Amino acid sequence: MPMKLPCLAVLAIALLPTAGLARPLTARDLVSLSQIEHPAVSRDDRWLVWAQIETDLASNRRHESLWRLDLAQRDGAPQKLDMVQGADLRMPTFGSDGRLYFLARTGDATSAVWSVAAGSGAPTKMTGDDDISGFLISPNADAILVWADRPVGATSLNVRAANDDGGGSARIYERLFVRHLNRWQDGQRSQLFLLPLAQGKAAGVSRAIAGGLEGDIPSKPAGQEDEIAWAPDGRTIYFALREPGDNEALSINFDIFAVQRDASAAPTKLTPGNPAIDTKPAISPDGRWLVSGGGKANAPSASVTVTCPVVNSSRPTAVTVTGGA
């Protein structure tokens, strides 16, 4: 009887999973992991497309590509989409016309929006190489909203920062921010521009739509397209913006603004009563309700509220739907 316990102990050790003997995860493993972003499903539920970021340690750079999976095939395998030679591809999204839209950035740091039929076909270049950072297709696929870094007050994408080659590397800043992660603040802002579409391509001159507002749309350094939204009828655009003022680096006061796509009037601030964060606007299918995430001034960072202004009223009212933790 006393011999049974040692035997059982040996048996238990022998049955331990071999995974317990695997080597630890290293920093090299972490930077080598593929990253998945922007999954998008076609309107007929057949295609799943996503952006995949992979790290090439030998060249010390990352590559972005698009992958596609045919959901109609039970055991289908992902397929890499090599559509623009030598370009990093990102931000896939399906339009109401069924086409797949994406952003292509080439090695010389220029980028443009392209589109392609969901199933197959040759891609079409929709915009010029305007160093675009992101885009949103209108609900009717008759216009494209893009954002790009441009000088404050730029009226179109054609306005570029002056090339100051006066020599020297000193920088003079009169207010914060000075740097966003790995990029210096260069006096430009991420701004919204509207381009009408005709026969699948941008037609006419781009137009700034944020009026005289100053700030970054989306916010920097980590803002994304969920800080911007189209109304279902494609007539109004909503966006979150932090107006810089004198203390931008210390402020969390983001507000939701609404502007007509033709920029016929200045943007309207929908959340003036909350001196804290209001962001990520989402519009109900009937266009009546705008939902945004937010917080309260001097509240813990985990405190979150969701407000519902009535957007078809001349004076929107905010209703708290959920309280913060």
Image (cartoon, rainbow, N blue to C red):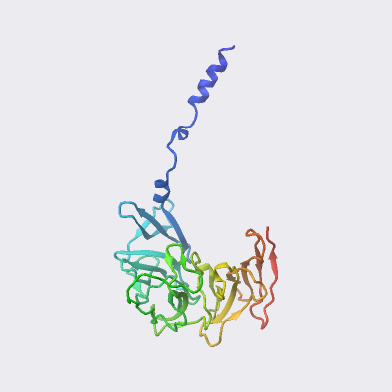
- Give the x, y percent position of residue 71: 45, 57
Residue 267 found in image quarter: bottom right
Q: Nearer the viewer, residue 249 or 62?
A: 249
Q: Nearer the viewer, residue 288 or 151?
A: 151
| Quadrant containing the N terminus in the rendered view | top right
Residue drawn at x 44%, y 52% as measured from the top left = 74
Residue 110 found in image quarter: bottom left
Residue drawn at x 40%, y 85% as measured from the top left = 205
Q: Nearer the viewer, residue 27 or 319?
A: 27
Residue 201 found in image quarter: bottom left
Residue occupying the far bottom of the picture:
264
| Quadrant containing the C terminus in the rendered view | bottom right
* Left or right, 213 with reference to 52: right
Q: Is residue 306 visible?
A: yes
Question: Would you place residue 9 above or below residue 28 in this image?
Answer: above
Q: How many marks?
A: 0
Residue occupying the far left of the picture:
85
- Give the x, y percent position of residue 287: 60, 76
Residue drawn at x 41%, y 51% as measured from the top left = 31
Q: Is residue 71 visible?
A: no
* Left or right, 207 with reference to 87: right
- Give the x, y percent position of residue 149: 43, 74
Question: Would you place residue 44 above or below residue 11 in this image?
Answer: below
- Give the x, y percent position of residue 156: 42, 82
Q: Nearer the viewer, residue 189 or 207?
A: 189
